[in-house]
């Protein structure tokens, strides 16, 4: 419910305005005009009938108030000892929202956030549909309030021109500045803004001529000389004051979001990867000295982004061949296809998958042995979760590599976090509202493994941006670091048709690998094992679009294991599906053993699908 008085009064009820009589509109407009103070019944009668109210005016007025309460809510109009008072929130009245936006515009100009101020001024002016409070224009208190609001509207128009000039958009508002002077030639501020817009647009002679015209108009109409502002602008133009030089215009905002969400930065994202410059330099120095770099840190600490968008990208810029791979459930196969060049730098990302996804000890040992052998002839970079370090180091040769190249990746410092938030926005031509970076940094500090959650929250904030500006309100609306991922996932669940929700549940459960100790890990599933059809394929596309799932030509994977921690619904599904997870682990081990014996693909082949059900190939016999 909302009340609009910046034009003909309307009560906004959902998508259509509520219908009320002209008499009720006058009473409501009079209550709005009092600015939250109580209006005496005699005042409201004067607004309705002037100085000649009918004998039944009290009863008629009571009927108006009763109907307005039905339209607005029973508590919207209070009866107080002195009369009636409008008791709705300020945000429900467009005039009050306009004043709030105008105050915010002024604050942003003081903070030198010109682009955001320009957006705010535009939002404020967009609320106007005509003269304010026309229903009570013949009532003195209503006329006074309407004049005050009209004056504020003129201020907003001028602030919009000022913000545009500061943002380097003088060409866009030059015509508007000229039209403002024509509409209100006695407002000196408008002459000054027009002269400044003309000068910044390279029209110095027009600017000086306009100032002479202003002096003539003010003298003729008001008998006054120009005030200090006009005189200061004229002096600045004559002196070519550097302060009047055209401001550098910010780049147009990029169409693509500068934040990747839960997905790690890859080699191709190097130009958008910020904040880890010191770690990149230190890691490359360690690699040059020892030939091995083992980046160890917690889940969500940024290891994958560092070794891919940081190390691998830097090495490729140097012209060095680099091969990047993840072990997956069959790590020996991942290393053999494609086989790294003998002299290439090998980057093994998420090396913990050799124990979290691989159930075959033979595959695990073969992979680690091959990695050790590669390190003997060419550089090696490994990213490994700290909680899996002991298990992977059960391989003696690999343990020696860790000793040589261990690099513990700690949490980002405040300065690094600020760079990681600010630099991608600047590169994309976006603006961060003052206070947003402070709020984000405060939320991330003390949250282990929060970097993917931070990136996702910023991605959702970017989607809620105002113009080119990422705002504090937009960030808070996402749920922040702790709630953005869960809100995104829950919104997707709510949009999913009820008949398809079991498919969504089974698909996500199939992308989570549960260890025997009950820990949930990010899993990957071959696309060929996924259910087909319009419903499942549409669900997969929506999961990918929400950055909750990643996919390539052959596999589908959870974007990050953080999803299993921060989305309560998925966590509850996992708890309910404990038995299904046990069966999946058993079938996975059995299938790997079967394949190791050379029986894979035979007549009795069977495989465990991602939904936990045993599948038989068409035409095949069961085991």
Image: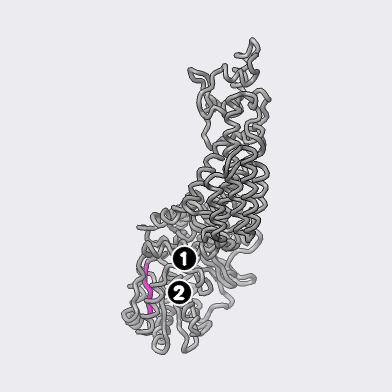
* Secondary element at tag 2: helix
10 Å crowding of disc 1: few (<14), some (14-19), many (20+): some
Name the image quarter holding residue 382.
bottom left
Picture layout, residue 204 above or below residue 86: below
Residue placed under numbered mark 1 in the picture: 522
Q: Residue at x 55, y 64 (%)?
A: 428
Q: Out of 240 and 566, give the one closest to the viewer.
A: 240
Provide residue 472's location: percent of width, then percent of height: 48, 51
Residue stretch rendered in magenta on the structure:
293-297
Q: In the shown orientation, is residue 25 left or right of residue 83? A: right
Of tags 2 and 1, which is closer to the observer?
2
How far separated are the C-alphas under marks 2 and 1? 22 Å
Q: Out of 119 and 356, give the one closest to the viewer.
A: 119
Looking at the rendered structure, the number of numbered marks drawn on it comes to 2
Name the chief secondary structure element in magenta: strand
Can residue 69 be seen? Answer: no
Provide residue 95's location: percent of width, then percent of height: 57, 36
Whether 241 is among the magenta residues is no
Question: Can you say which quadrant of the picture contains the N terminus?
Answer: top right
Q: In the shown orientation, is residue 410 left or right of residue 538? A: left
Question: Can you say which quadrant of the picture contains the C terminus?
Answer: bottom right
Residue placed under numbered mark 2 in the picture: 310
Q: Are marks 2 and 1 in contact (CB under 8 Å)?
A: no
Which of pointers 2 and 1 lies earlier in the amino acid sequence? 2
């Amino acid at each position: 419910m909302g009340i609009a008085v910046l034009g003909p009064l309307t009560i906004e009820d959902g998508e259509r305005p509520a219908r009320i009589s002209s008499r009720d509109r006058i009473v409501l407009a009079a209550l709005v005009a009092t600015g939250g103070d109580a209006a005496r019944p005699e005042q409201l009668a004067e607004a309705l009938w002037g100085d000649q109210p009918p004998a039944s005016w009290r009863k008629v007025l009571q009927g108006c108030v009763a109907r307005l309460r039905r339209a607005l809510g029973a508590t919207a109009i209070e009866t107080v000892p002195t009369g009636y008072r409008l008791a709705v929130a300020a945000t429900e009245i467009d005039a009050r929202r306009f004043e709030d936006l105008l105050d915010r515009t002024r604050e942003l100009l003081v903070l030198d956030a010109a682009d955001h101020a320009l957006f705010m001024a535009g939002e404020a002016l967009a609320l106007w549909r005509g003269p304010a409070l026309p229903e009570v224009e013949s009532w003195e208190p209503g006329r006074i309030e309407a004049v005050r609001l009209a004056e504020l509207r003129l201020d907003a128009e001028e602030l919009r021109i000022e913000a545009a000039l500061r943002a380097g958009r003088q060409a866009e508002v030059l015509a508007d500045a000229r039209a403002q002077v024509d509409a209100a030639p006695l407002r000196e501020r408008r002459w000054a803004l027009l002269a400044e817009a003309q000068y910044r647009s390279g029209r110095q002679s027009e600017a000086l001529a306009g100032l002479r015209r202003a002096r003539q108009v003010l003298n003729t109409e008001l008998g006054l000389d120009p005030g200090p502002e006009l005189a200061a602008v004229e002096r600045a133009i004559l002196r070519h004051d550097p302060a009047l030089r055209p401001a550098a215009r910010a780049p147009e905002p990029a169409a693509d979001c500068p934040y990747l969400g839960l997905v790690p930065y890859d080699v191709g994202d190097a130009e958008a990867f910020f904040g880890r410059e010191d770690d990149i330099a230190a890691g490359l120095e360690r690699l040059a000295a020892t030939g091995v770099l083992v980046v160890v840190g917690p889940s969500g600490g940024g290891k994958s982004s560092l070794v891919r968008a940081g190390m691998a990208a830097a090495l490729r810029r140097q012209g060095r061949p680099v091969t990047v791979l993840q072990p997956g459930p069959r790590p020996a196969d991942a290393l053999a296809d494609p086989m790294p060049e003998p002299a290439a730098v090998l980057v093994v990302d998420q090396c913990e998958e050799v124990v979290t996804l691989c159930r075959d000890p033979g595959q695990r040992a073969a992979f680690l042995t091959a990695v050790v052998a590669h390190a003997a002839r060419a550089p090696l970079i490994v990213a490994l979760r700290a909680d899996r370090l002991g298990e992977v180091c059960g391989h003696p040769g690999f343990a020696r590599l860790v000793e040589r190249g261990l690099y513990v990746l700690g949490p980002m410092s405040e300065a690094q976090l600020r760079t990681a938030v600010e630099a991608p926005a600047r590169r994309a031509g976006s603006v961060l509202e003052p206070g947003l970076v402070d709020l984000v940094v405060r939320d991330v500090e003390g949250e282990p493994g929060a970097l993917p959650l931070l990136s996702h929250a910023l991605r959702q904030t970017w989607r809620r941006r105002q113009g080119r500006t990422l705002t504090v309100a937009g960030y808070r609306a996402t749920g922040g670091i702790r709630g953005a991922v869960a809100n995104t996932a829950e919104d997707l669940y709510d949009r999913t048709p009820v008949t398809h929700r079991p498919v969504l549940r089974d698909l996500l459960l199939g992308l989570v690998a549960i260890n025997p100790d009950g820990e949930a890990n990010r899993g990957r599933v071959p696309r060929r094992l996924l259910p087909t059809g319009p419903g499942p394929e549409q669900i997969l596309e929506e999961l990918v679009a929400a950055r909750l799932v990643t996919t390539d030509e052959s596999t589908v994977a959870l974007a990050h294991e953080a999803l299993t921690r921060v989305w309560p619904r998925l966590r509850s599904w996992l708890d309910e599906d404990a038995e299904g997870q046990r069966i999946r682990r058993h079938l996975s081990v059995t299938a790997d053993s079967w394949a190791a014996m050379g029986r894979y693909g035979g007549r009795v082949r069977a495989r465990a699908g991602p939904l936990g059900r045993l599948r038989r190939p068409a035409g095949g016999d069961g085991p």
